[in-house]
Image (tube, rainbow, N blue to C red):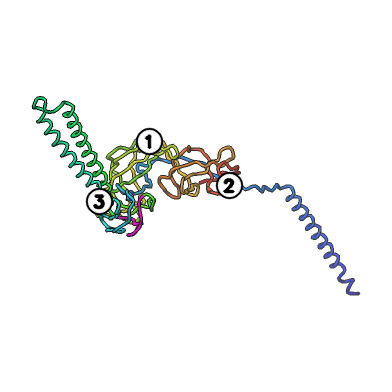
Amino acid sequence: MTIYSVLRPYLHVALITGTGFLLSQCGNSSAEKNAMAETPVDEEIRYEAIRVTASRPTSELSLPGELESYYETDLYPRVSSYVKALHVDIGDQVRKGQVLAELEAPELTANLTEAYSKVKAAEAVYGASKGTFLRVLRTSRTLGAISPVDLETSRTKAISDSLAVVAANAHYNSVQQLVSYLKITAPFTGVITDRRLSPGAFVGPGGQNGVPMLKIKQLDRLRLRIAVPEAYLGDIRRGNPVQFSVRSFRNQTFTGRINRVSNSVRPETRSEMIEIDFPNKGGMLKPGMFASVRLPVSSSGEGSLYVPKSAIISTLDRTFVQKIEDGKAVRVTVQKGDDTAGQTQVFGDLKPGDILLKTASDDISDQAAVKTQLVSQ
């Protein structure tokens, strides 16, 4: 018996098995191709969108605010002159009426001297004409000594010269007022926060008139400005206490009272500006600091609107979300409120049920057509 005759049954089985495997693989490949051909491929980008929902209102509203000086101003020279001396610099405490800088203008000094000499000359002329009139008046009491025309002429001359004295004094006072502008004084008690010019600089009309010499801000009294959403305006009353905190002093809470209400709602944010005066004893707080304000409000039956933080974009000029309307991403200006658990309270032209992009993008222009799919918040 040969080896082939012994192995022939096994070779036959192996051949049948291999052929079946190849046929099955060919069948599977064809099925996969048919399945891929039948499955549609959606190449359009779909953005995740969420539905705006209302949550329970809070009894305390958290709003951002900014501290400002109660008084602040830029000091400009009022006459063409040169900076003679600066007596203060950045950070100096100054009192109201304190001389901050001295200017020099030789032509103004000369004009003042000239105006003064004109006053004295006018007074001398008036003195002579007045004396003449009095003598003529006494002489006229003698019948026929002075004609009525000469009496009237002398009286008119005395009146004219007296008016010349008034005019000369007015001119002198105006020049004297200009000379007083050569001393820059503090309009209120505060701190110098900026100095732009140095001694020798030419200032005033025709010079560096667009640059303020000094900037002064009041620090012992600040004002806190916050924008209150329209939904809570019914809770705003003058005199209501308000608490706020700043990042520089995380463990401290400051208290003030509402002093001014603008009584005007801004249409772009649907909010009203209010101001809170704060006596800043010791100068602990600084103008320009951002504050987190806790404003007590009463609960109502209406809920507040919360959206994910990723749905809000803040730029230099506005804060907005992208609402889906008729398949287009429309930018809607909002104001941010309280933050909690990754959700941000918003106020604006929104209502429960509106659809927003879950992750807003500044690359998507206003009114741009987009495809969306709803997801949970």
Q: What element does badge 1 sit on?
A: strand
Q: Amino acid at mark 3?
A: Thr
Q: Considering depth in this image, is 223 or 293 the residue closer to the camera?
A: 223
Q: Residue furthest right?
A: 1
Q: Are marks 3 and 2 in contact (CB under 8 Å)?
A: no
> Marks 3/1: CA distance?
32 Å
The residue to which callout 3 is attached is: 189
**Would you identify the image quadrant in which residue 61 lies?**
top left
Say which residue label 2 marks.
47
Identify the residue at image location x=54%, y=41%.
330
Q: Real-space Cα distance between discs 2 and 1? A: 38 Å
Residue behind mark 1: 264
- Frontmost residue, 310 versus 2: 310
Disc 2 is placed on an element classified as strand
Q: In the current view of this chain or complex, which residue is farthest to the top? A: 143
Give the side of residue 337 with respect to residue 357, left or right: left
User: Which label sits in the foreground, 3 or 2?
Assistant: 3
Classify 92 as above or below 135: below
Vertical relation: 131 (above or below) 207? above
Q: Position of residue 187 (x, y in %)?
A: 26, 48
Location of residue 193 in the rendering, given as x and y in whole percent from the top left corner = 32, 55
Q: Is residue 201 magenta?
A: yes
Instruction: Please provide the residue range marked out in magenta.
Output: 192-204
Residue in the picture at 30% in, 41% down: 258
Count all numbered tags in the image, as a single digit.
Answer: 3
**Label 2 Cα crowd, 10 Å radius (few <14 / some 14-19 / many 20+):** some
x 17%, y 37%: residue: 129
Upstream in sequence: badge 2 or badge 1: 2
**Label 3: how many residues lie within 10 Å, few (<14), some (14-19) or many (20+)?**
some
Q: Residue 22, image x and y in percent? A: 80, 60
Along the viewing direction, whichever of 321 and 272 lies nearer the viewer: 272
